[in-house]
Image (cartoon, grey):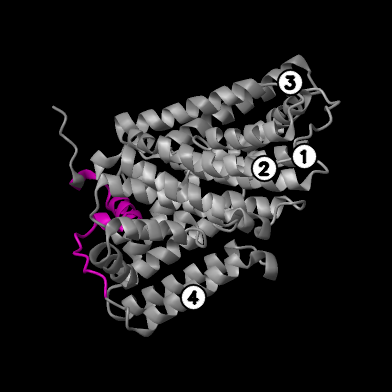
Amino acid sequence: MKKALSILDVPPFLVLIVFSFFPSLSFAQEITPPLNLTHHFVGYAALALTAIAYIAAMTEDVIELKKSKPMVLSAALVWFSICIYYAMHGQAKTAALAFESNLLAYIELLLFILVSMTYLNTMSERGIFDGLRIFLLNKQYSYRQLFWITGALAFVLSTVVNGLTIGLLMGAVALAVGKNQPKFIALACVNIVVGANAGGTMSPLGGISTLFVWQHKILHFTEFFALTIPCIINFLVPASIMHFSVPKETPAISKQTIALKRGSKRIVFLFAVTLAITVSSNVLLELPPAAGMMAGLGLLQFFNFYLTKTEQENGAEIQKSFDIFKSIADVDWDTLLFFYGAMMIIGAVGFVGYLDLVAHFLFGEMNVSIANIMIGLSSAFIDNGTLMFAVLSMHPDISNGQWLLLTLTLGVGGSLLAIGSAPGVGLLGQIKEGYSFGFHLRCMPAILLGYFLSIAAHFWVNSVSF
């Protein structure tokens, strides 16, 4: 009879290799709680480096330094200082595990957005968005109609694609159809920013803050749909006010014809399949959203292989297949690395102990609704994803209705200023005619009215969840 294999039968060198790669398997360690460094030099240094990094990132256009650079360097300095202090006190493992926990949260976000941007870059290369621009021009819509069409498309598309990508794409469309009409371009860009942020707030697939809440399993995928009416109000109110300032003229018809490259429609279908896999695997199998998105990236890679092989067999030379790795390389790495720095810095500040103090004040001494509204207003200055990650690190004990309120205020609060959200920052860098920080600021009263009316709608529609 064949003897059952036991651990003693495994070669010692193999056991040593396994334990060297997975040290947590070798000994059961009791991890001590983090030290309170809020009144220590390390804590003060963390706050100072965080402030310097954010000031440098917010003044990117002035100092001409990419926003990711100060954030990544500051994150490294903060965590190294914390880890050195913990190592000096014999608790290096505690700090290392805290860093790994924050890193895992970032990796899930990175993979999700990376796949989304790769699909969008591939669609752009196949001519889908150029086709949309030519289609709109050929329809001879007036500027006012184009104002609503671009804003509505930004709202709808941002429910499944991140707001930065949609903002840049629809901004390019507005720039193309509004040539020599800077006022239309400026108003359309403001409308696109508001639409992209509002649409992304009602779906965990479109907004960074909603994605965080979904990834942390605080709200289920379908619970975000409760924000549909508040988000629609947030988009319609400022758009209706700005409508009367949009020129009434009609742009000249385009002389170009739509020429989509081979496989373009099938890539759109694959993207829809990817989103379906992502949602279903999370709801049914409780897998993180990144798992479904990476499966979709595999589908896109094999479709790229299919296009390449069939073109070689048919001898086609006019329309070559796309380069999947070029689509990956062309994603907005500056923004992705900015989020790395932001999440790691916020995680470090929380590990030091400052977020517990803030949480005690916001969710202990203040009214929770007022606290969430104030946090949303602050997202006009600080990225909503960073703020949401900070709140999640506080672990507040609040109801689902309050989590929805926080998601709403953080998602749409970034529309108040051009620097408050990824679509606004992206358009500031892309659009050189009409749209500016000052012009967006002049539209803030209308956006602020939409902000408070959407909050009122949430309290009315979702009163049961509080």
Q: Is residue 465 left or right of residue 142?
A: left
Instruction: State the separation of the CA atoms marked 2 and 4.
Output: 37 Å
Which structural element holds mark 2? helix
Instruction: State the separation of the CA atoms marked 1 and 2.
Output: 9 Å
Residue at far left of view: 1
Disc ID at residue 188: 2
- Residue placed under numbered mark 4 in the picture: 49
Which structural element holds mark 4? helix
Among numbered discs 3 and 4, the one appearing first in the sequence? 4
Mark 2 and mark 1 in contact (Cβ < 8 Å)? yes
- The image shows residue 6, relative to residue 346, as above or below, that is above
What kind of residue is marked 4? Leu
What kind of residue is marked 1? Gly
Which quadrant is home to the C terminus?
top left
Among numbered discs 1 and 3, the one appearing first in the sequence? 1
Nearer mark to the viewer, of 3 and 2: 2
Among numbered discs 3 and 2, the one appearing first in the sequence? 2
Instruction: State the separation of the CA atoms marked 3 and 2.
Output: 44 Å
Q: Is residue 346 magenta?
A: no
Q: Position of residue 268 (x, y in %)?
A: 59, 25
- Residue placed under numbered mark 3 in the picture: 312
Q: Residues in magenta?
A: 8-35
- Residue placed under numbered mark 1 in the picture: 178
- The image shows residue 27, relative to residue 179, as above or below, that is below
- The image shows residue 5, relative to residue 104, as above or below, that is above
What kind of residue is marked 3? Gln
Q: Quadrant of residue 389?
A: bottom left
Instruction: State the separation of the CA atoms marked 3 and 4.
Output: 54 Å
